[in-house]
Image (cartoon, rainbow, N blue to C red):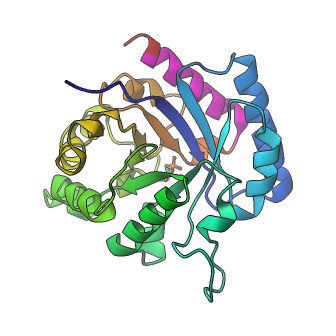
Amino acid sequence: MPTAMPRSMVAGNWKMNTTLAEAVQLAAGVRDGVAALNGLAGVDVVLCPPHISLQAVAEAVKGSAVKVGAQNMHYEASGAFTGEVSPAMVQGMCDYVILGHSERRQLFGETDDLVNRKVKAAFEYGIKPIFCVGETLEQRESGRASEIIGGQVRAGLDGVGDISGLVVAYEPVWAIGTGQAATPEVAAEIMGGALRDALGSLFGPAAAAIPLLYGGSVNAGNVESFAAQDSIHGSLVGGASLQAEPFLEIARLTAQAKASL
Ligand code: 13P
C-alpha cells in the first residue's frame, strides 16, 4: 500500500541574485501574496536566497506560511574551509537546503560523494534536503538519462536511513535557464520511472511519501501541465522566482492543479 500522498511544494531558487535589500523586498512580496491567497493550503512555499540574505529573509517571513531554504552548505560543522558556510550556521535560519544542484556539480566540481556527505549532514542538523538530480543533454541523447538519474540517487542518498523531510528535485541540465522546459511527459517518465524506482529500491514503500519537484524553465505558463502529473508534486523555480507576482502565480496554479487531481 502506498503511504500518504506527498505534500506539494513550490521552491524558489534565487541563485546568485538579489542584494540584501532586494531579497527582503522580494520575500515580503511573496509573504504578503501567500497571505492574500489564504496560505495556499496544501502547497509549501519555500524561498532560497543567497546565504548572506538568509537571516533577513527568515526575519521577513517569520510567522507566515513561507519557509526558507539555503542554496548549499558544507558538511562539516566548523573548521578551516575558507569561504564555506556550515550546517551549524544555517541551522535556525532555514528549514531546507538545496543540495546537489547541477550548477554546484558542473561549475564547482561537486561529486556524488560530496553531495552525499552534505545530505547526511543536513539530516544530522535537522535541515530538510532538497536533493537535486539531472542528466545533461549529451547523457539524454545517448539514451542514458534513466541510468544517470538512478546512479545519482543511489550515490547521493547512500547510507541515509530516516528520510523524513527529504525532497527530491529532478532538474534536467538541458532545461535549466534555457527556456526549454522538458515536456511534462518527459519529466513524468523519469520521475515516475527511474527516479521513483531508485528511491523505492533504497527506502522501500516509505519512498512513496517523498515529494518530487520538477525544475528547469518552469513559469506561470507551463507549471499547470507539470503539476497535473501524478508523479510531480511541485517545482523548483529559478528565473521565474525572482519576482513575487510570477512566483505567486506558479504557487497558485500548482495548488489549483493539485486540488483538481
Ligand atoms: P530556471 O527556472 O531558471 O530554469 O532554473 C531552474 C533551476 O535550476 C532551479 O534550481
Give coordinates of residue 105: x percent, y percent: 41, 70
Q: Quadrant of the N terminus?
A: top left
Question: Is residue 247 found inside the magenta-colored segment of the image?
Answer: yes
Give coordinates of residue 68: x percent, y percent: 66, 46
* Part of the protein shown in magenta: 243-258
- In terms of image quadrants, where is residue 80? bottom right
* Vertical arrangement, residue 182 with respect to residue 113, above or below: above
Q: Which residue is depicted at the point 40% across and 31% down?
A: 233
* Left or right: where 32 falls relative to 51: right
Q: Does residue 100 appear anywhere in the picture?
A: no
Q: Quadrant of the C terminus?
A: top left
Q: Does residue 51 appear anywhere in the picture?
A: yes
Could you say which is closer to the camera, residue 13 or residue 67? Answer: 67
- Tell me how many marks there are: 0
* Left or right: where 46 falls relative to 187: right
Q: Which residue is depicted at the point 86% across and 53% down?
A: 21
